[in-house]
Image (cartoon, helix red, strand yellow):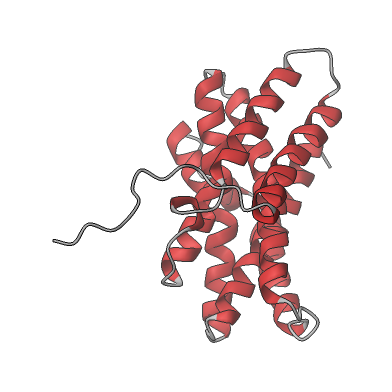
Amino acid sequence: MEIITLIDILGTISFAISGALTAMHKRMDAFGILIIALVTSIGGGTLRDVLIGKTPVTWMQDQVFPTVIFITAVFAVLLRSKLKYVRRSLFLFDTIGIGLYTITGVQVSLAFGLDPLICVILGTVSACFGGVLRDILCNEIPIIFHKEIYATACIAGAVIYLLLSKSEVPQSIAMILSGTTIIGIRILAVVFKWQLPRLYKREVSE
């Protein structure tokens, strides 16, 4: 198995768990849990593939991905009692997911010969858009659109990966360092309550 495929599968598992946890927190039924897990896992990659003209999109060409999502969602439901701290579990798997999917998105974009800036954008899209769809379907404001540092971490990791990939650093090391950067920034941002500056101080009443 190629390392890029392995990373894609690990990211799929992480996002499937993230989606399933969110759906269970919203008290959805079994079908709802499966749909949210599916959308969270494939949303970003699907948008990326459509934008670069890679069709059919990745998950439609390999039955491994739908199978992994289904199995992961089932296990998340069965082991829900073990996931005592749902918010912490959701944060953990979501953070791992964006780290892995950013790398995958950048690699796929590079394979299509796209400009580095576009690769960074598509890597961020791959990592974030599934979570955006998950939150919208679960009637939540997507994390990427408000206080927490989320996409910024993906952008930083994507830039580091691009810089390392152009040097003599082995690909595996580049992946580990960039993925660790994304996960590290995300965790530190939450622990130390880092936030991007807001453009307003109070709501303006009309």
Instruction: Find residue 99 and report its horizontal and vertical position in percent.
Output: 69, 45
Residue 165 placement: quadrant:
top right
Which residue is nearer to you in this view: 87 or 128? 87
Q: Is residue 46 visible?
A: yes
Could you tell me which quadrant the C terminus lies in? bottom left
Where residue 61 sits in the image (x, y, percent)? 60, 48
Q: Is residue 81 above or below residue 133?
A: below
On the picture, is 119 further left or further right than 70? Answer: left
Q: Nearer the viewer, residue 123 or 50?
A: 123
Residue 104, relative to residue 30: is it above or below?
above
x%, y% of residue 43?
Answer: 51, 54
Give the tally of numbered discs: 0
Q: Residue at x 83, y 13 (%)?
A: 168
Quarter holding residue 190: bottom right
Q: Quadrant of the N terminus?
A: top right
In the picture shown, does residue 75 fall above or below 43?
Answer: below
Q: Residue furthest left?
A: 206
Q: Nearer the viewer, residue 129 or 149?
A: 149
Residue closest to the far top: 167
Horizontal and vertical percent position of residue 109: 58, 28
Q: Residue at x 62, y 24 (%)?
A: 111
Answer above or below: position of 3 versus 15: above
In front: 74, or 98? 98
**173 left or right, relative to 119:** right
Which residue is at a point 45% across and 54% down the rendered structure image?
A: 146
Q: Is residue 63 visible?
A: no
